[in-house]
Image (cartoon, helix red, strand yellow):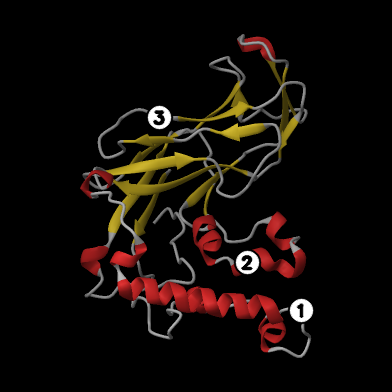
Amino acid sequence: MDWRICASPVLKTSPEATHLMKRLTAYVIDGHDLRIRTAPVEREWMDDSNRRFAYRCLPLNIANAHGWEILCSNAFSAIWDGRNSLDAIRIRSASGTASPAISHFGDGILTFHVPCLFRTEPGVDLFVTGPINRPKDAIAPLSGIIETDWSPYTFTMNWRFTRPFQKVYFSSDEPFCHFFPLGRGSLETFIPEMRNLSENPDLEQEYATWMESRNAFNRTLDDPASAAARDKWQKSYFRGVTPSGETGSLEHRSRLRLRPFTSE
């Protein structure tokens, strides 16, 4: 099945936005199943945070939803005994089901095969990593960047155990891979430099205004009658405004709206 998506900053296709659209195609190998979804903002640990305060962090929310996730086809467990050989990882899946992961490289690495060839526009790579802001005990995802505008090769998503004798579990439909397009060579266009804040008086003034406001907010936060207690948190960055009240950027976003993969 040929799964496709057109990635664009807007969901409704207008004549003005057509030139912004880029195609991201997932060619699933015949006979295989591939479950892909847009990465959600929600995380269980964020739901469980005190008054869901974790969702007040806009950079965290945007990162959570920054791309798509590939999901496990079946549930399984795995445990590593600390050796470097292929048989050092023992994997068990539910009766009658095949495990989505195997021990392929050794060295405590758990490998997921992705039965798909991705295609991006010329000059666009695919950044592949583990599910963002989804920590998993005793095992950590490894990241890679793939030139998907030409490569006829599949790739694997790998996780490395961080300690032995700790069983890890992956449930059915749990994400094991997160990916998003990345312009090749974009990092090389940046000229990194370091300066004193005082060299930018306008920025320094905004910072000073923010620090004064933040300190005052924190001082009165424990007072039930205060504006800080009523507001609970400062929302300037979330709203995209500077400490002085100016609009920070006309392109400020408080959420991402990515298209799902479809077969049309």
Q: Disc number at residue 129?
A: none
Q: Residue 127 occupies which quadrant of the picture?
A: top left
Seen in the picture, residue 194 relative to 184 is either above or below; the reply is below
Q: Which residue is mark 2?
A: 55
Q: Disc number at residue 222?
A: 1
Q: State which tag comes first along the sequence, 3 or 1.
A: 3
For label 2, the SS is helix
Frontmost of labels 3 and 1 is 1
Seen in the picture, residue 189 relative to 55 is either above or below; the reply is above
Question: How many marks do you count on the picture?
Answer: 3
> How would you rate the neighbour count of disc 3 (Cα within 10 Å): few for under 14, some for 14-19, many for 20 or more?
some
Quarter occupied by the N terminus: top left
Q: Disc number at residue 154?
A: 3
User: Left or right: 201 with respect to 112?
Assistant: left
Picture residue at 61% right of the left edge, 69% below the top: 56
Picture residue at 26% right of the left edge, 40% below the top: 149
User: Left or right: 76 with respect to 159?
Assistant: right
Q: State which tag comes first along the sequence, 1 or 2.
A: 2
Q: Nearer the viewer, residue 129 or 196?
A: 196
For label 3, the SS is loop
Seen in the picture, residue 214 relative to 145 is either above or below; the reply is below
- Kind of residue indicated by mark 2: Tyr
- Kind of residue indicated by mark 1: Asp
For label 1, the SS is loop
Question: Horizontal and vertical percent for residue 40?
Answer: 57, 59
Q: Distance of mark 3 from mark 1, alpha carbons?
A: 55 Å
Seen in the picture, residue 144 relative to 257 is either above or below; the reply is above
Frontmost of labels 1 and 2 is 1
Q: Residue 110 occupies which quadrant of the picture?
A: top right
Question: Horizontal and vertical percent for residue 19?
Answer: 21, 65
Q: Residue 64 occupies which quadrant of the picture?
A: bottom right
